Structure formats: C-alpha cells, structure tokens
Amino acid sequence: MNIQVQCCGIVLLLFFLYFYSRQKNLHLNTGTAFFRTLIATLVSITMDALSIIAICNGEKLPPLFVKLVCKTYLATLILPVFCAVYYICTDIYTRRVEYRRVLYCNAAIGLVGIPLIYLLPISIHCDMAGREVYTYGPSVLAAYASASIYFVINWVLLLRKKNVIRKSRRASMQFWMLVWIGAAIIQFFHNELLLVGYASAIGIMVLYLKLENPEMNLDKETGLFHQMALTRYLKQLSNREKHVSILLMVFEHSFYQNSSQESETVAEMEMINFISGVPGTMAFRSAGDEILLLYEDRAEAEKGLGILRRRFECGWGKDGQVFRHPFWIYLPDSAMLQDVKDVFLLIRHARQNSKELVDNGFLQIGGEFIQEMYRTREIEWLIFNAIGQDRIMVYYQPIYSTAEKRFTSAEALVRITDESGRMVPPNDFIRAAEKNGMMLRLGEIIFEKVCRFIKESNPAQYGLQYIEVNLSAVQCAYAPLADTYIAIMERYGISPQFINLEITETAALGTKKVVLDNMNRLIDYGVSFSLDDFGTGQSNLNYIVDMPVSIVKFDRSMTNSYFENGKAKYVMDAAMHMIQGMQLKIVSEGIETREQCEIMEALGINYIQGYHFSKPLEEQAFLAFIRGRNA
C-alpha cells in the first residue's frame, strides 16, 4: 500500500493539533476558523488513507463498502477548501449578518456537490502489487468540480478584498492554494500520485507557523497576551457587539524590602500567575506598566477585583518582601463606551486626567468621565483638523502703559474655530493640546503667525514696543525650543527685542534646567521674558528670583481678590513692592472697569490689560484700535 505520503500528512497535522490545543489560546475568530480547517484537513487525509486501505483489501471487503469509503473520502476532500473560504471570510466580513449570508451561500455548493459524489458512479483502480491505487469516474469529477468552485471563490475573495485582508494572511492563503492546485493537477493526470492530502497539510503548516501559532499572541516576558492580541480581541468584541467588564492595573511604583534580583523575578512571576489564575480573567499586558483584565461577566469582575485588591495588600516572593501597589481603573460595563475598541482611549484619558487615581489609587469609571473623554477626543480631532486646514488664528489684546499713557504692547492669544466657524473655548483646546503632544506644533504655528504679523504690519509704527507670546509647560520642556524660535525669527527678519515670551511657574517644575537653558539662549539672542499667572498655583517670590524674567503678570484672580478681599490687598501690596524692588515691571490682568484701572495706576502698576480697554481682537481690528487710540 502506498500511503506513506498520507501518513506523513497525518503525523504533521497531529503534531500541530497537539501544540495548538496545549497553548494558551485567545479564541479569536480566525483561530477558531483555523482550528476547524485543521480538523477538516486531518479528517480528509485520514479518509484518504482509509480509502487506500479499503481498496487494497477489496477482495476481503464488500464492494459497496469499499465504494462508500472512497466516496466519503471524496466528500471530505471538499471540507478543507470550504473551511479555507470560511477562514478568509473571518477577515473580510465583520458584520454577522453579512458573514453568515456569504457562508450559507458557500455551504450550498457543498450541499449540492456531496450528494452528487454519493449518487454518481465511481471506478476503482488497483494494480496487483497495490502500488497504483486511485479512483476515477463521474463521482471523482463531481468532487474535483466542487473543490474547484471553492478555489475560484477563494481567489476572487483574495483579489477583490485584498485591502481588507491582512497582507500576511493573503500571502499565506495564496501559497496554500497554489500548493494544493499544483498537487491536484499532478494527481488528476497521474492518479497514482496521491498528493492532494499532503499538500493540504503543508498549507496548514504555513498558516500555523506564520499566523495561527497561539504563542504569537503572548508577551514573551510575562506570558500574558500582548497589546496586539488585545487590539484584535477588542475588534472581535466590537464586531459581535459584545460587552465586557474591564479592570486596568497600572504599576508605576514598586517597593522592595531587602530583596535580591532573583527574589524580585520570582515575585513577578508569582504575581503574574496569581492574576492569570483569578476565575473568569483574561489577562493582557497592554503596556510596559499596565495589565488589563477582561471579564465577560460583571459579577466575576467584581469578585475578581476584590480578590486582587486583597492580595496586593500583602507582599510577594518567597519571604513576602516584594510589594507592588498598582493604581486601579475599573469600567463595570463596556456598554458605556461608544465602541469597546475605545478602551485604549479610556486608559490614556484616565491616566492623564484622573485626580482620584492619584489620591486614592482607585478609579471607577462613570458616565460623566466617559462624556468628558469623548469631548476631549473631539477637541483633539478639531485641533488636528484646524492645523491641517489653517484654522489657527491669533488675536491680540492691547496692554496699556501707565507711565506712557498709551498702548505699548499686546498679548498674542490663540483662537481656533470648528468647521462651522464657532469659536472653541481656549482652555479646552490648550489643555488637550498639551496632553496629546500637539502643543509643540501649535506653539510653532502661533509664533510663526506672530512673526509674520510683525513683519507685514510693522506695529512699531503705531507705538508698540513688543508682542507677548505664551509658552506652555510642554514647550518650555522642549530642549530645541530656543533654536526653533530663533530660526523662525531669522526667517522673517524679526528683531528679537520685539518678542516677549510668557512662561508660567509650572513650566519649570521637574524640567528647570531645560527651561533655564532655553531662556538664557533666547535672552542672549535678545528676547525678553514675562512670568505669567503670578498669584495662582504655587507662585512664590523665590521663583521670580530664580527665573531671568523682566515682567511679572498678576493673574486675573489675584487682581479680583485685591478688590474683593481685604487681606488680599496686603498680600498684593507686599508682592508688588518686592517685585518692583527687584527692578521688574508688573502687568495687572483682568481689569474690567475704569475704577479698577485708576486704582491699579495709583498703586504704581506698570501695565494694565483687560476688557476695560479691549477684548482680544483679530489682526486688522487690533491695528485699527492701536492706530486710533495711540494717535
């Protein structure tokens, strides 16, 4: 009997079946489809071998039984190629209704082909030595025709849907089918060469090694599912419109008590194994310091949360001397999200904005938090589109000099409109830009627009001495800031004396060296600096002493407190005298009435800014204002 090739194929498939079933599996749709294709191929090759055995022992077995076995093999020959269509469709059709419709249509081909295989006559050839064993006739042609139709469908799907199917999956499927077609053609013209089953096994091997090895979904360091696997699983949940409970553990800090590196490694693995062993838990390493847990049942999530929090109160390792204190972010039901794939957006927003997370180490996500998250995303898209469509505008608010009795400077303020032309509140988009990394680009655009305005309008002819431009904390911490701004000024031929950059005290927290390096570089070039928002946050006079600023700006809240709170007057008076004693100028922001203006002027405040004089104005309106008032 010539069944060596079939036996090799069976052994190969059993090998992959063993390893596939033994490994931790994410149960993705493609994995399920692959597993069914593997089983179908194994059944087909096994029936191929059994049909050969039946033919070679034909004189001992009833002829009807032998033909039934051979026809059953031919029927199973259709299964692998049908499963291949099923496998490809899992990548293409995400909507269940569409997916099932395509699958049912393809199944109809088999429902027609398989009965034909059993109804049509079959002929059997077997030489005296049993070396040439094959079947032929109408039944065989029906099997080949049905399989060929499935192959055509596969190729059509691969070509027409190539933009939807993953490139690696498309290439692997094409390789498999080419091997199968080549083997089928050889076997069709040389019936004694039974290669089709083994060719199918080779295709399964390629799919396993390149795409469907469950180990490819695992993080090598922890053994948990990695972030890419999480992305695929969330996509599958989204397509199924299935909801889960989500628990995120953020490990920002560790505490070790007299522990060696070996004991720390042991403790880490003990912790990972414990997390993975909590009932109902699917554990993913979503980032270097994050472990994300999914629960299909909310009751199991609540129970798992309690188990984990109690266990993390104790130490890990052989002697219990390794302590991990994660932050906990808990979303009871992903139905609160517009799409379960927004989990990554939720994680980022929670880590950036949650004061509760910092204070208590635990945050349970609610509806208001979700609404704020989506609002922030809208603003981020708005900024992105505004940059691309040049909807970034600069408005100018005049600043009045009490000594010269005229307007000598102005503050440049960024404004953004949405696509309908509506102004977006500055606090909203500035906060979002600082957190999502767009502030550097936004800041450069604003500064370049200010330089272009100075060059084209020459506001010095109307009495202006400088323009104030705000710098965010993100910009101040950017090491190449000075070189970038100097390059922009040189490109527009702007005198650096016409630029005053405003920084806030929070800009230097944690990055003071970078801030001072940038400031000194720009000061050497000729730019001056102001300290903005004095009177908020952690402002103190030591900060003014340390920073090379020439102007201090009293925040609106400090100005208002002066008029509303008796004690605040003494604080502001003391601060003002000390600042002026350091030969620094003072700007008072937020002045809205004539009375406030006169009081600030009597106190010796150098510059006054506020709605009493003007709200921020677009370029042409600002120039008209300055021309009229300074004339």
Image (spheres, rainbow, N blue to C red):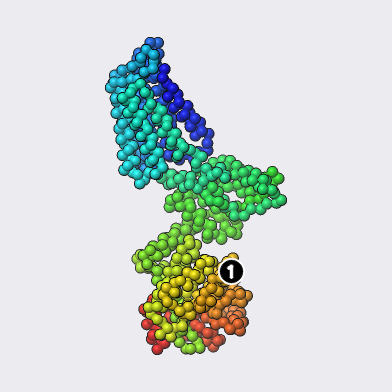
Near-viewer residue (621 or 438) = 438
Residue 488 location in percent, x, y? 44, 72
Q: Residue at x 50, y 56 (%)?
A: 348
Near-viewer residue (606 or 162) = 162
**Label 1 Cα crowd, 10 Å radius (few <14 / some 14-19 / many 20+):** some
SS label for mark 1: helix
Q: Quadrant of the N terminus?
A: top left
Q: Is residue 212 left or right of residue 277?
A: left
Near-viewer residue (265 or 552) = 265
Q: Is residue 426 visible?
A: no
Q: Residue at x 31, y 20 (%)?
A: 136
Q: Is residue 553 above or below residue 336?
A: below
Residue 375 lies in what quarter of the image? Answer: bottom left
Q: Quadrant of the C terminus?
A: bottom left
Q: Is residue 79 left or right of residue 601?
A: left
**Residue at the top extreme, as displayed:** 59
Residue 511 location in percent, x, y? 58, 66
Residue 185 location in percent, x, y? 32, 28
Q: Is residue 212 above or below residue 617?
A: above
Q: Residue at x 43, y 52 (%)?
A: 338
Residue 270 lies in what quarter of the image? Answer: top right
Q: Is residue 398 left or right of residue 328?
A: left
Amino acid at dot 1:
Lys
Residue 463 location in percent, x, y? 43, 85
Q: Is residue 266 visible?
A: yes
Q: Residue at x 57, y 82 (%)?
A: 584
Count up the numbered dots: 1
- Disc 1: which residue: 512
